[in-house]
Image (tube, rainbow, N blue to C red):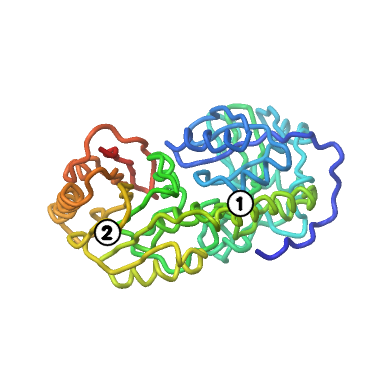
């Protein structure tokens, strides 16, 4: 990836050695994110639905952004105050310090929520915070990058400040990630219903898939699950190929960042010599196969992912390997033209094929309704429940025999 741009001038004086932070994730993935943080040597605690609190050194903050596969973004506390009125807000705003975290030359987007507070008018709150914190204008509405969650904003999203008002308590946090962490930097063409990379990573982590096990995705679409697996097998950190908001902070530490990047490169070099278990991406749609092929190349794993056009009825295990995992995001009702009976038929056929040809393999399905998994012979409780846009998503698993 290109070297970071020189940071704006600023001082690190007054900053604590560890920053209070909140790691945000999709609801239902908190346990997986906590396990990832623990693997980085970061202790965390629950902080509400889809959030974990932690205290991070600069290095841990940088590593969390680069290495977390199942989180959405990392927010850093800039201050907290108690105010029941706008007058009190103005009097106590000195408790908030955004100077270490914001480039004053760039626009800032405020995301404000208010619950059970007299400060209900979020527009009025924003007007005062912009004036008191000298934040300047918001990004132009509708422009690429105006919304940091917009897929167009992955290269240069706006700076984001998240303000939460709960009763009289006002917390101000600055986003250190920029584009959400599921923007890995490799996605080009997408299928009809592309799966978010964090959900793919969460499925792989939850079933315990390891790079020395073969992996098959019979409904690969644009390739998210196989590519996520292949990059992990190749030792590529989830955020190795993208930029982060923290790189533009006045308090950014280039030497620490360089050390993290060296560690990321070392992991990739070490994985280059490891044995490669087959990773198969199959789909019956030629457009999806073309998209998966291009995305695998963009992700640097074209040689690690076997992409081919095939219907589920033609699915067979890779030759010369033992059992592994089938992990897939099959068609949902909205992704398969029409009736629910057609959808159930697809799941039933998948269950029949895997039972007949994949003895000893594990099967993991991402489904909007557990009854679809039942049609494939996968029963029991979901391993986790989360959201895919407006829809619920459940991970249903049949463990290896």
Q: Residues within 10 Å of mark 1 (few under 14, many from 20)?
A: some
Q: Nearer the viewer, residue 240 or 85?
A: 240
Residue 70 against residue 92 in the figure, above or below:
below
SS class of the residue under badge 1? helix
- Relative placement, left or right, of 179 versus 78 is left
Distance between the alpha carbons at the discs numbered 2 and 1 = 37 Å
- Image coordinates of residue 146 in percent, x first then y, are 58, 60
Viewport quadrant of the C terminus: top left
- Relative placement, left or right, of 29 versus 140 is left
| Disc on the earlier residue, 2 or 1 | 1
Location of mark 1 (residue): 267
Question: What count of labels does the image hold?
Answer: 2
Q: Nearer the viewer, residue 8 or 95?
A: 8
Taking the view exactly as shown, the residue that stands out farthest to the front is 320
Location of mark 2 (residue): 335
- Image coordinates of residue 4 in percent, x first then y, are 73, 61
Viewport quadrant of the N terminus: bottom right
- Image coordinates of residue 2 in percent, x first then y, are 68, 65
- What residue is rendered at 27% in x and 56% in y? 317
SS class of the residue under badge 2? helix
- What residue is rendered at 39% in x and 66% in y? 292
Q: Residues within 10 Å of mark 2 (few under 14, many from 20)?
A: few
């Amino acid at each position: 990836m290109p070297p970071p741009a020189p940071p704006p001038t600023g001082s690190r004086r007054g900053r604590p050695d560890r920053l209070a932070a909140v790691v945000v994730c999709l609801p239902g993935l908190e346990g997986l994110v906590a396990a990832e943080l623990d693997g980085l040597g970061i202790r965390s605690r629950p902080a509400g639905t889809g959030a974990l609190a932690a205290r991070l050194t600069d290095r841990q903050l940088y590593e969390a952004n680069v290495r977390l596969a199942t989180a959405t973004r990392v927010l850093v506390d800039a201050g907290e105050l108690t105010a029941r009125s706008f007058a009190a807000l103005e009097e106590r705003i000195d408790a908030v310090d955004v100077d270490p975290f914001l480039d004053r030359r760039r626009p800032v987007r405020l995301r404000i929520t208010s619950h059970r507070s007299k400060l209900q008018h979020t527009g009025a709150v924003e007007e005062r915070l912009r004036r008191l914190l000298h934040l300047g204008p918001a990004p132009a509405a509708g422009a690429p990058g105006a919304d940091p969650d917009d897929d167009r904003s992955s290269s240069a999203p706006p700076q984001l400040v998240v303000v939460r008002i709960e009763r009289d308590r006002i917390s101000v946090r600055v986003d250190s990630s920029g584009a959400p962490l599921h923007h890995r930097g490799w996605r080009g063409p997408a299928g009809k219903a592309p799966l978010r990379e964090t959900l793919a990573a969460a499925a792989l982590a939850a079933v315990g898939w390891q790079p020395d096990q073969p992996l098959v995705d019979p409904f690969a679409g644009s390739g998210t699950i196989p590519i996520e697996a292949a990059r992990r097998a190749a030792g590529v950190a989830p955020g190795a190929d993208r930029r982060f908001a923290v790189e533009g902070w006045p308090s950014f530490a280039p030497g620490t960042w360089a050390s993290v990047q060296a560690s990321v490169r070392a992991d990739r070099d070490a994985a280059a010599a490891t044995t490669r278990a087959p990773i198969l991406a199959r789909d019956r749609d030629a457009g999806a196969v073309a998209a998966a092929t291009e995305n695998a190349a963009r992700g640097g794993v074209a040689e690690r992912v076997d992409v081919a056009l095939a219907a589920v009825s033609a699915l067979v295990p890779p030759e010369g390997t033992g059992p592994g995992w089938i992990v897939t995001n099959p068609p949902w009702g909205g992704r398969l033209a029409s009736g629910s009976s057609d959808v159930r038929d697809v799941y039933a056929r998948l269950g029949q094929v895997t039972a007949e040809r994949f003895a000893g393999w594990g099967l993991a399905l991402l489904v909007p309704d557990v009854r679809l998994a039942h049609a494939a012979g996968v029963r029991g409780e979901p391993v986790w429940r989360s959201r895919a846009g407006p829809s619920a998503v459940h991970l249903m698993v049949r463990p290896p025999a």
